[in-house]
Image (cartoon, rainbow, N blue to C red):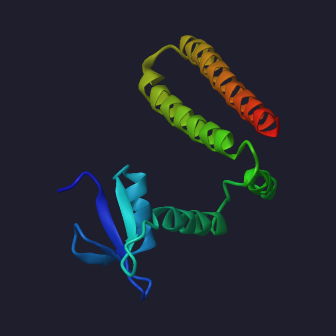
């Protein structure tokens, strides 16, 4: 078994799990995500990696049913970053923020045995440290990007 599961998407729009040797649905792919199982989706026609497109399709389905995660304002703000000078910095900021949030959830689950006040104090202090580091990194990236643009104009 490889480190990453390969899913092939055929022209008939069906997804084939090469490890299980059967067709699967988007719900099955969502389950892989939820169970943190690494995978890659390959277009069988041209062997291109279409994992991002499939994940976006899953997100669209999730957003269309139930309570959406993203507001229209949030989506508009994200769209405004495309093609801008800070697109890369914004992408790293979002990814780091999501990783930080996931780690905090795990820590919180582990620490539920602590007295509540001590837990909240420790988590608050850690959050402040982590957000400060994240903001400093974003400022460093933004400054470097702006400096690079100024040098290009000279």
- Answer with left or right where residue 119 lies relative to residue 135: left
Q: Which quarter of the figure is the N terminus placed in?
A: bottom left
- Answer with left or right where residue 44 lies relative to residue 94: left
Q: Position of residue 4 (x, y in %)?
A: 29, 55
Q: Is residue 123 above or below residue 65?
A: above
- Answer with left or right where residue 9 lies relative to residue 136: left
What residue is drawn where x is 60% and y is 21%? 130
Count of residue discs: 0
Q: Quadrant of residue 32?
A: bottom left
Q: Is residue 14 above or below residue 145?
A: below
Relative to the observer, which residue lies in front, 137 or 102?
Answer: 137
Q: Position of residue 108 (x, y in %)?
A: 50, 27
Q: Quadrant of residue 49?
A: bottom left
Q: Of all residues shown, which one is farthest toward the bottom?
A: 12
Q: Quadrant of residue 44?
A: bottom left
Q: Position of residue 11 (x, y in %)?
A: 42, 86
What residue is drawn where x is 57% and y is 16%? 126
Q: Which quarter of the figure is the C terminus placed in?
A: top right
Q: Is residue 51 above or below residue 147?
A: below
What residue is drawn where x is 69% and y is 25%? 140
Q: Position of residue 104 (x, y in %)?
A: 52, 29
Relative to the observer, which residue lies in front, 105 or 58?
Answer: 58
Q: Of all residues shown, which one is farthest toward the left?
A: 1
What residue is drawn where x is 29% and y is 60%? 5
């Amino acid at each position: 078994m490889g480190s990453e599961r390969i899913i092939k998407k055929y022209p008939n729009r069906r997804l084939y799990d090469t490890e299980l040797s059967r067709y699967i649905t988007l719900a099955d792919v969502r389950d892989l995500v939820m169970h943190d199982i690494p995978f890659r989706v390959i277009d069988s026609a041209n062997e291109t990696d279409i994992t991002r497109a499939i994940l976006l399709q899953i997100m669209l389905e999730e957003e269309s049913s139930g309570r959406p995660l993203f507001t229209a304002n949030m989506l508009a703000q994200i769209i405004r970053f495309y093609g801008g000078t800070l697109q890369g910095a914004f992408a790293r900021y979002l990814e780091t923020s999501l990783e930080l949030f996931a780690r905090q959830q795990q820590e919180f689950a582990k620490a539920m045995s602590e007295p509540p006040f001590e837990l909240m104090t420790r988590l608050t202090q850690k959050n402040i440290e982590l957000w400060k580091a994240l903001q400093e990194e974003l400022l460093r990236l933004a400054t470097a990007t702006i400096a690079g643009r100024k040098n290009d104009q000279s």
